[in-house]
Image (cartoon, rainbow, N blue to C red):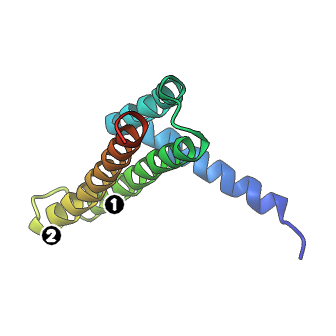
Amino acid sequence: MAINFRHLYGALLYSLAGIRRAWQEQAFRHEVLVLLIMPFALWLIRPGLVWSAALLAAWLLVMAIELLNSAVEESLDLITRDSNIHVKYGKDMASAAVFLTICANALLWGVMLWERFIG
């Protein structure tokens, strides 16, 4: 089975287009800022390679869920711009998914910091 590089290249271009679109969202830009700060914070704290990789990967999951949240919002806006309780519920639930992944990240950071400095 050969690797289809044309397909991979096309998929990469679609992904980059999605990231360019997401850049227009303030929440995504904030999440990118956190991602850029994290290596410096991890270098200062020195939690070890496994913790560092886990924390960076967990934050990338926040960003992935943010992209899905934005996709849900874009899709629901195509249905109607009028006030619709079901559209609101859909948007709120997608936003809650981002919130929960941020909570999971806070928990991971708390456990890592506890282990590193207290435990």
Q: Residue at x 51, y 36 (%)?
A: 47
Residue 19: image location, x then y, percent = 52, 43
Q: Which residue is mark 2?
A: 86
| Residue 24 shows up from this direction | no
| 101 horizontally vs 91: left or right | right
Residue type pointed to by label 1: Val
Q: Nearer the viewer, residue 117 or 23?
A: 117
| Residue 71 shows up from this direction | yes
Q: Residue at x 85, y 66 (%)?
A: 3
Mark 2 or mark 1, earlier in chain:
1
Q: Secondary structure at mark 1?
A: helix
Q: Local crowd at mark 2 within 10 Å, few (<14), some, or many (≥20)? A: few
| 21 horizontally vs 78: left or right | right
Q: Residue at x 68, y 51 (%)?
A: 12
Q: Nearer the viewer, residue 54 or 1?
A: 54
Q: Residue at x 39, y 56 (%)?
A: 71
Residue 18: image location, x then y, percent = 52, 48
Residue 57: image location, x then y, percent = 52, 49
- Tell me, for residue 72, which label it has, or none: 1
